[in-house]
């Protein structure tokens, strides 16, 4: 596997940090793909192709969600922040944090 995106030598990273890097890099790729499909769908004049692009966009979002869940299960830091913010009904930025 490529070590692209690493900022220190691979051998200096713990197994957990490297796995987190793989998940985070994959999440970035899935989000980028979802963004690309959404933009292409907006720009597409063929209705059938547009439907395919939007289907693909939804699949990339599903992949992103699976990676976020993996991060939640494997990083207490992600778990803490996701528990605080996901599906909350209050202001996203709490008073005093602006
Ligand atoms: Fe994907």
Image (cartoon, helix red, strand yellow):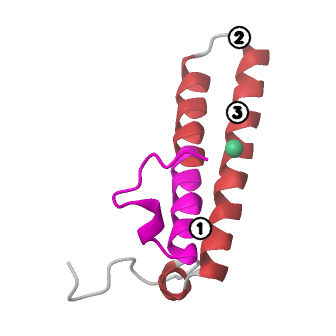
| Residue drawn at the location 73% of the way across and 35% of the way down | 56
Mark 2 or mark 1: which is in front? 1
* Left or right: 87 in relation to 56: left
In this view of the protein, which residue sits in the foreground, 20 or 68?
20
Q: Is residue 35 above or below residue 92?
A: above
| Residue drawn at the location 41% of the way across and 55% of the way down | 6
Q: Mark 3: give few (<14), some (14-19) or many (20+) Cα within 10 Å.
A: some
Residue 88: % across, % down: 53, 82
Main SS class of the magenta portion in the image:
helix
User: How many circles with numbers are drawn on the protein?
Assistant: 3
Query: Distance of mark 1 from mark 3, alpha carbons?
Result: 30 Å
| Residue drawn at the location 51% of the way across and 76% of the way down | 14
Q: Is residue 47 above or below residue 96?
A: above
Which mark is on residue 19? 1
* Left or right: 81 in relation to 52: left
The residue furthest front is 11
* Residue 16 shown in magenta: yes
* Residue 32 shown in magenta: no
Which mark is on residue 46? 2
Residue 36: % across, % down: 54, 31
Query: Distance of mark 2 from mark 1, alpha carbons?
Result: 40 Å
Query: Distance of mark 3 from mark 2, alpha carbons?
Result: 12 Å
* Left or right: 7 in relation to 61: left
Residue 17: % across, % down: 50, 73
Q: Is residue 11 above or below residue 88?
A: above
Give the labeled residue for mark 3: 54
Q: Disc 3, disc 2: CB below 8 Å?
A: no
**Quick one: SS at disc 2?**
loop
Query: Which of the two discs, 3 and 2, labels the residue nearer the N terminus?
Result: 2
């Amino acid at each position: 596997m490529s070590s692209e995106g690493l900022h220190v030598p691979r051998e200096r990273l713990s197994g957990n940090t490297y796995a987190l890097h793989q998940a985070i890099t994959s999440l970035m790729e899935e989000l980028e793909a979802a963004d690309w499909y959404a933009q292409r769908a907006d720009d597409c004049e063929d209705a059938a192709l547009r439907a395919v692009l939007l289907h693909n966009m939804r699949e990339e979002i599903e992949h992103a969600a699976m990676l976020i869940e993996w991060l939640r299960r494997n990083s207490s830091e992600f778990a803490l922040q996701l528990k605080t913010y996901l599906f909350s009904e209050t202001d996203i930025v709490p008073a005093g944090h602006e």
